[in-house]
Amino acid sequence: MSGISRPITIWQRVLVYAALLIVLASAQVFPGQWTRMPAPDFLLLLPLIIGLTRAGREGFTMGLISGFLRDYLSGRLYGLGMLEGMIIGLLAGLFFSENNKIFWRRLLLLCPGVTLAHVSVMALLSYLFPFDPGLPLSLIMILRETLVSLPLVLLANLFAAVIILFFLWLGFYQKKKKHRQTAGKG
């Protein structure tokens, strides 16, 4: 996306990303806000969208930071969230394109793909490493529960992608300058 991928100073980027992290992490973990539908996973999609829009190291770095926040807010200091965020940001940077059509196609494919991969891996890990070993859970039961909630999770994460893109557009917005052509200069 041309408006989001424009060059800005490092301090402007830090300010935009810090505000984005604070707002989205607060919205994601605010208790009781997401009772009727699954919470959008802003911190999962943030490195994906930044990698697709900004390329370079920014997706990787944001994956590290948002993965750390996901781990820290869930009670773990270091964990799979950091690794997952870094991989998502790195791979998304490889799919960067200035062409708007290609960007939207990749976003509409990668956003559900990342969500599906994340939900599948978490379902498998919850079977392999249950919180309560005395609780009899079968893989079929875990997969059934995962598949029942999957459409709402995909919808919530598409909503999260739109919100993230809107915040990035606001953060990187620049008014178009009118160029005056001066006649007679020579």
Image: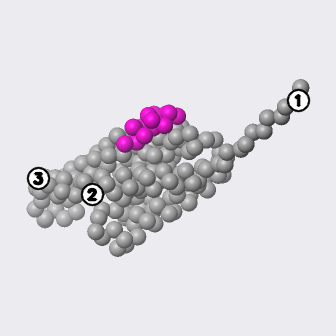
Q: Residue at x 55, y 50 (%)?
A: 169
Q: Which residues are magenta?
A: 91-108
Question: Which of marks 3 and 1 precedes in the sequence?
Answer: 3
Task: Give the vertical position of 75 relative to 127 (above or below).
Answer: below
Is residue 47 covered in magenta? no
Question: Which of marks 3 and 2 precedes in the sequence?
Answer: 3
> Is residue 67 among what the camera can see?
no
Is residue 102 covered in magenta? yes
Q: Residue at x 48, y 51 (%)?
A: 165
Disc 1 marks a residue whose amino acid type is Gly
The percent coordinates of residue 124 (x first, y second) are 21, 50
C-alpha distance separating marks 2 and 3 = 20 Å
The percent coordinates of residue 142 (x first, y second) are 16, 56
Q: Quadrant of residue 39?
A: bottom left
| Residue under numbered circle 2 | 152
Q: Residue furthest bottom?
A: 32
Image coloring type: one colour
Disc 3 marks a residue whose amino acid type is Ile
C-alpha distance separating marks 1 and 3 = 78 Å
Q: Residue at x 60, y 49 (%)?
A: 172
SS at mark 1 in the image: loop
Q: Residue at x 24, y 54 (%)?
A: 150
Would residue 113 be found to the left or right of residue 123 on screen? Answer: right
Numbered circle sitting on residue 184: 1
| Residue under numbered circle 3 | 140
> Is residue 1 among what the camera can see?
yes
Q: Residue furthest front?
A: 183
Within 10 Å of the Cα at label 3, are there few (<14), some (14-19), or many (20+) other Cα atoms?
Answer: few
